[in-house]
């Protein structure tokens, strides 16, 4: 016996996938921007200030 769901349009799955891709893209952009802002803030610190928080200049480049 086959059951068909008639309350949901057939394209709902496609739209949901597109929303997931869009959300992933936005998440990647937000993450990239957060890392960029963090790197810029750390580059403004002196070597002594970086040492106080346990970082070196090389650590900044890895972020």
Image (cartoon, grey):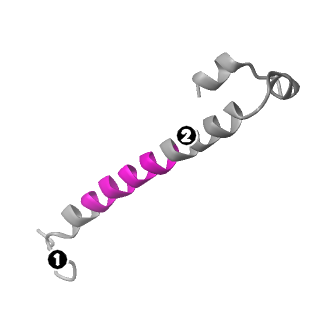
As displayed, is residue 54 above or below residue 7? above
For residue 19, the mark is: none
Q: Percent from the top left, x then y, of residue 30?
A: 49, 51
How packed mark 1 is, by other alpha carbons closer than 10 Å (few <14, some 14-19, many 20 or more), is: few
**Pick the front one: 41 or 3:** 41
**Residue at the bottom extreme, as displayed:** 7
Q: Which-is-in-front pick, marks 2 and 1?
A: 2
Whether the magenta-drawn stretch holds residue 39 is answered as no
**Pick the front one: 24 or 55:** 55
Q: Percent from the top left, x then y, of residue 60?
A: 64, 25
As displayed, is residue 14 above or below residue 29? below
At 84% from the left and 29% from the top, the residue drawn is 49
Residue denoted by label 1: 9
Task: Report the number of discs.
Answer: 2
Residue denoted by label 2: 36
Secondary structure state at the residue bearing disc 2: helix
As displayed, is residue 3 above or below residue 62? below
Q: What is the spatial separation of the Cα atoms under label 2 and label 1, in whole angstroms? A: 41 Å
Q: Is residue 43 visible in this depiction of the protein?
A: yes
How packed mark 2 is, by other alpha carbons closer than 10 Å (few <14, some 14-19, many 20 or more), is: few
At 19% from the left and 76% from the top, the residue drawn is 5
Secondary structure state at the residue bearing disc 1: loop
Q: Percent from the top left, x then y, of residue 43?
A: 67, 31
Instruction: Name the quadrant containing residue 58.
Output: top right
Specify the quadrant that holds the C terminus: top right
As displayed, is residue 43 above or below residue 41? above
In the rendered view, does 50 fall on the left or right side of 44? Answer: right
Prevailing SS of the magenta stretch: helix
In the rendered view, does 7 fall on the left or right side of 60? Answer: left
**Pick the front one: 15 or 23:** 23
Q: Which residues are magenta?
A: 17-31
**Pick the front one: 44 or 58:** 44
């Amino acid at each position: 016996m086959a059951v068909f769901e008639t309350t949901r349009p057939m394209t709902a799955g496609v739209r949901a996938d597109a929303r997931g891709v869009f959300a992933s893209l936005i998440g990647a952009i937000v993450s990239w921007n957060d890392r960029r802002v963090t790197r810029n803030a750390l580059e403004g610190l002196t070597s002594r200030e970086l040492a106080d928080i346990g970082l070196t200049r090389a650590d900044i480049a890895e972020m």
